[in-house]
């Protein structure tokens, strides 16, 4: 079922302590509501500030679009996202937007054009739409991340692992969304990766939206540090889990193995971790032969001195 001539779009938004930012996120979506917006599902993770009060103001102004929920206690990012997922009902496309981000004006219209041009059946086709996104750093500088690499025939799963394709700005059909499995919530890293990679494993077709969608404001949200030994151990565990759980080509396997060696070297400066890091990193580059890897390491250690 469509809204007029447009497919129905549901926006999933999780938030925590964002009373000064969530207005920007909501306004950026609501100003495009004429282009098929069905609803904004908001899951507030028991914010201790006035985030919920701001959400209620928008609920009063836009009751037909705001579907708001507040957790009784703080669940954490990915358990909260899992809960937000459970509220999705009877729609055509789903897109995520955090409470401290925004969606570029005009993006929903660009999305609708791609849907129409490709005659996408949201109820039967497992399809992802990938748009570009913008990163805004605290100085105000803007960086545009283009999402066109997958069109050259690369696997989107491999591109995700290599950091060359992101889920920001992407929309999935309701047919694909219904195939999602529960997230692995053992730790935040597993939750993040199991959320991201399902989209790529389950999609059967993908299309590019030639427009900027998500606007990510760097260094203002909730993040975790990589400096503590506990966090490094967690990174090693989750990266090994990625290797053991998900299908990937040899280049990606070597890249993840290099990350494990990098984390281990950060904890323990033994040369074996240093050599293994460079070996796996170079082997993750297509065309590298083991002899070339050893020659490069030898050159780095001795010839450059």
Image (cartoon, helix red, strand yellow):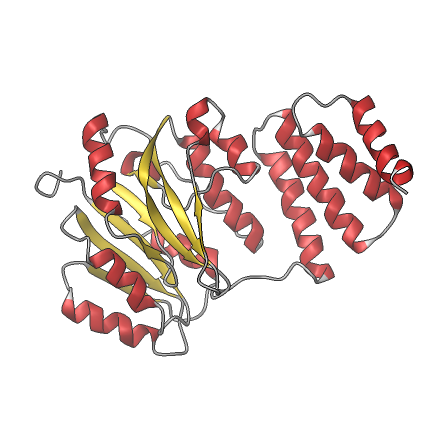
Please tell me which residue is depicted at 63% across the width and 41% down the height of the picture: 241
Q: In which quadrant is the C terminus drawn?
A: top right
Q: Name the one closer to the observer, 178 or 260.
A: 260
Q: In this view, does 225 lie to the left or right of 208?
A: right
**Residue 178 appears anywhere in the view:** no
Task: Say above or below: 125 vs 219.
Answer: above
Along the line of sight, the residue nearer the viewer: 64 or 225: 225
Which residue is at a point 44% across and 29% down the rendered structure image?
Answer: 150
The answer to whether residue 304 is visible is yes
Q: Quadrant of the N terminus?
A: top left
Left or right of 88: which side holds 79? Answer: right
Task: Depth check: give the residue in front, 100 or 63.
Answer: 100
User: Residue 186: percent from the left, percent from the top?
Assistant: 57, 52
Query: Residue most toward the bottom?
Result: 49
Q: How many marks?
A: 0
Tell me where residue 25 appears, x and y as whole percent. Answer: 31, 61
Q: In this view, does 59 lie above or below 201?
A: below
The residue closer to the viewer here, 110 or 86, is 110
Residue 112 % position (x, y): 20, 38
The correct choice, above or below, for 127 with respect to 71 in the image is above
The residue furthest left is 4
Quick check: 68 left or right of 100? left
Residue 190 in picture, x, y percent from top left: 56, 48
Identity of the residue drawn at 21% across and 69% down: 58
Taking 193 as reference, is 225 left or right?
right
- The quadrant where residue 52 appears: bottom left
């Amino acid at each position: 079922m469509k809204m007029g001539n447009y497919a129905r779009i549901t926006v999933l938004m999780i938030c925590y302590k964002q009373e000064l930012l969530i207005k920007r996120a909501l306004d950026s979506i609501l100003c495009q509501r004429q282009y098929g917006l069905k609803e904004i599902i908001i899951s507030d993770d028991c914010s201790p500030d006035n985030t919920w009060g701001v959400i209620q103001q928008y609920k009063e102004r836009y009751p037909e679009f705001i579907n708001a929920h507040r957790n009784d206690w703080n669940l954490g990012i990915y358990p909260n996202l899992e809960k937000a997922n459970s509220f999705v009902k009877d729609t055509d496309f789903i897109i995520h937007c955090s409470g401290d981000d925004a969606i570029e004006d005009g993006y929903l219209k660009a999305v609708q054009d791609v849907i129409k041009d490709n005659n996408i059946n949201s109820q039967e086709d497992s399809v992802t739409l990938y748009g570009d996104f913008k990163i805004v750093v605290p100085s105000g500088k803007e960086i545009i991340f283009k999402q066109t690499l997958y069109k050259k025939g690369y696997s989107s799963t491999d591109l995700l692992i290599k950091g060359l394709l992101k889920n920001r700005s992407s929309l999935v059909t309701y047919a694909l969304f219904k195939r999602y499995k529960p997230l692995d919530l053992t730790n935040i890293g597993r939750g993040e990766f199991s959320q991201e990679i399902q989209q790529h494993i389950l999609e059967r077709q993908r299309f590019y939206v030639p427009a900027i969608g998500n606007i990510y404001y760097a260094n203002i949200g909730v993040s975790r540090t990589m400096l503590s030994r506990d966090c490094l151990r967690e990174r090693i565990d989750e990266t090994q889990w990625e290797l053991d759980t998900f299908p990937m080509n040899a280049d990606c396997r070597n890249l993840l193995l290099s990350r494990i060696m990098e984390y281990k070297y950060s904890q323990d400066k033994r040369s074996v971790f240093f050599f293994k890091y460079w070996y796996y990193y170079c082997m993750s580059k297509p065309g590298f032969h083991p002899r070339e890897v050893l020659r490069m390491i030898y050159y780095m250690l001795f010839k450059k001195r």
